[in-house]
Image (cartoon, coloured by chain):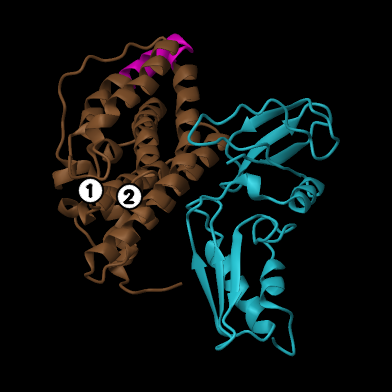
Chain colours: A cyan, B brown
């Protein structure tokens, strides 16, 4: 343990997602593991991407290394794994609450085992709480979001698509 | 079945070339939302291509990484199917291409996600979830255009007729592949035929079946696509941001 910083797990868990800046990579479920070698002090961090083409991965890796270095763990390796595939079901309750508070409607339950994407019947407006909402575009400003609109308060909002 | 470099290149090149074609719609799609949708689908395909080409390079063991494989091969070394390299045409042609590609990739990735090669299974398991959205998107547009106005119906039927012959190549038998594509055509038809019927479109008869992509024999369209995709990397070898 470093004199300057906390335990590697706590340091990495606090890294904020570069595109959804209200939640941490831990809350988003993309942080899979943090292991510190007691002999060498080397920290190995395992992460998994939300989407295969997620362009934020390079920034996330750099942010993890920077955070660890600042906390006194300069020897860090970030490993990326693809199985099991990330699911929106892994987003924590606190993560969902923070997303909603930031105007991003959290996802419903994800499809299982290649079955069709479940029809989302209602997505609650994160601004006014109404359920009278409609999808404007199933693809939004990032790979993981769809664009919705509230018919009650007329505000547009992002919805994290179930995956 | 053992995974070979050629199998991975076929999968990776399909995804890479599809991504490049879809990317051509950026700032040119019929509406802003569609612009974003096609860019997102392209990004998914690119993500899968990067993982597959990285794996292909490591398996080959000749020191080629994803960039070397994407940017420094010539057309004859690409193993993608002809369907993905065909020009975008009008929006209906793009949607026909996407519908057929997704209806092939979904059962393919689903089968691969259970194959013995753990690394390939992991990639396929991830890509499968994304392709389900691509299929849904292409399906909705096919319904909208096919069952829309007389003009949109005419164009969608024309697009389906034009692209259909190129779907046969997707299911060329390859008993050495981790998943033999020949076994996927029934699932492909089970996805596509109801969509065409609901869209009031006629399912084209099977006949002419152009092929050659898996052996490196491509249409001239691929060369132009590669020229645009590769020019920057080749003009500035080793350049970094």
Residue at image x 29%, y 30%?
Answer: B184
Which of the two residues, B142 or B214, is positioned nearer the viewer here? B214
The secondary structure that dominates the magenta segment is: helix
Residue B156 within the magenta-colored segment of the rendering: yes
Q: Chain of mark 1?
A: B
Residue A27, position as x, y percentages in the image: 70, 57
Q: How many marks on residues? A: 2
Please tell me if label 2 and label 1 are on a single chain.
yes
State which chain disc 2 sits on.
Answer: B
Give yes or no for contact between labels 2 and 1 (Cβ–Cβ under 8 Å): yes
Residue B227 at x, y = what percent? Answer: 26, 54
Q: Is residue B215 left or right of residue B46?
A: left
| Nearer-the-camera pick, A82 or B6 | A82
Position of residue B205 relative to residue A21, above or below, is: above
Q: x, y (%) of residue B6? A: 21, 52
Quarter location, residue B83: top left
Q: Which residues are magenta?
A: B146-159
First in sequence: mark 2 vs mark 1: 1
From where the camera sits, is residue A107 visible? yes
Left or right of B226 on screen, residue A86: right
Identify the image quadrant of residue B169: top left
Find disc 1 in the rendering and name its residue. Answer: B1
Is residue A48 or residue A122 the one in the foreground? A48
How far across and down, in percent of the image, does residue B94 sit?
Answer: 38, 31
Instruction: Please tell me which residue is depicted at 13% across the width and 44% down the height of the picture.
Output: B217
Question: What residue is rendered at 62% in x and 78% in y?
Answer: A66
Q: CA distance from mark 2 to mark 1?
A: 8 Å
**Residue at the image point whose x is 80% and y is 48% from the top:** A97
- Which of the labelled discs sits on residue B116, or is there none? 2
Residue B27 appearing in the image: no
Q: Compared to A39, does B237 lie above or below?
A: above
* Number of residues whose C-alpha sits closer than 10 Å to that of mark 2, classed few (under 14), some (14–19) or many (20 or more): few
């Amino acid at each position: 343990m470093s004199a300057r910083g906390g335990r590697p797990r706590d340091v990495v868990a606090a890294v904020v997602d570069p595109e959804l800046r209200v939640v941490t990579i831990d809350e988003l479920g993309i942080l899979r593991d943090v292991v510190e070698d007691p002999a060498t002090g080397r920290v190995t961090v395992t992460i998994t991407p939300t989407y295969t083409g997620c362009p934020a991965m390079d920034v996330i890796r750099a942010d993890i290394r920077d955070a660890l270095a600042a906390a006194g763990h300069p020897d860090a390796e970030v490993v990326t794994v693809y199985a099991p595939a990330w699911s929106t079901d892994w987003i924590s309750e606190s993560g969902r609450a923070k997303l909603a508070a930031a105007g991003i409607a959290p996802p419903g339950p994800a499809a299982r085992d290649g079955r069709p994407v479940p029809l989302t019947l209602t997505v609650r407006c994160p601004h006014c709480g109404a359920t009278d909402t409609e999808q404007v575009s199933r693809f939004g400003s990032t790979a993981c979001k769809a664009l919705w609109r509230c018919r009650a308060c007329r505000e547009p909002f992002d919805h994290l698509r179930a995956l | 079945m053992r995974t070979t470099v050629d199998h991975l290149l076929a999968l990776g090149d399909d995804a890479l070339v599809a991504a490049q074609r879809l990317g051509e719609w950026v700032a040119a799609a019929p509406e802003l939302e569609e612009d974003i949708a096609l860019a997102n689908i392209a990004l998914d395909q690119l993500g899968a291509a990067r993982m597959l080409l990285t794996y292909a390079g490591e398996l080959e063991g000749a020191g080629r990484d994803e960039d070397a494989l994407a940017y420094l091969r010539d057309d004859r070394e690409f193993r993608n199917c002809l369907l993905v390299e065909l020009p975008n045409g009008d929006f209906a042609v793009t949607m026909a291409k996407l519908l057929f590609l997704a209806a092939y990739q979904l059962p393919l990735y689903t089968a691969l996600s259970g194959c013995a090669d753990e690394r390939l299974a992991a990639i396929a398991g991830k890509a499968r979830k994304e392709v389900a959205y691509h299929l849904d998107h292409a399906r909705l547009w096919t319904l909208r255009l096919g069952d829309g106005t007389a003009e949109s119906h005419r164009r969608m039927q024309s697009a389906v007729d034009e692209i259909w012959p190129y779907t046969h190549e997707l299911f060329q038998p390859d008993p050495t592949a981790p998943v033999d594509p020949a076994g996927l055509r029934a699932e492909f038809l089970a996805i596509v035929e109801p969509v065409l019927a609901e869209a009031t479109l006629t399912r084209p008869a099977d006949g002419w079946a152009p092929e050659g992509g898996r052996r490196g024999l491509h249409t001239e369209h691929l060369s132009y696509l590669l020229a645009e995709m590769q020019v920057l990397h080749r003009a500035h070898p080793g350049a970094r941001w």
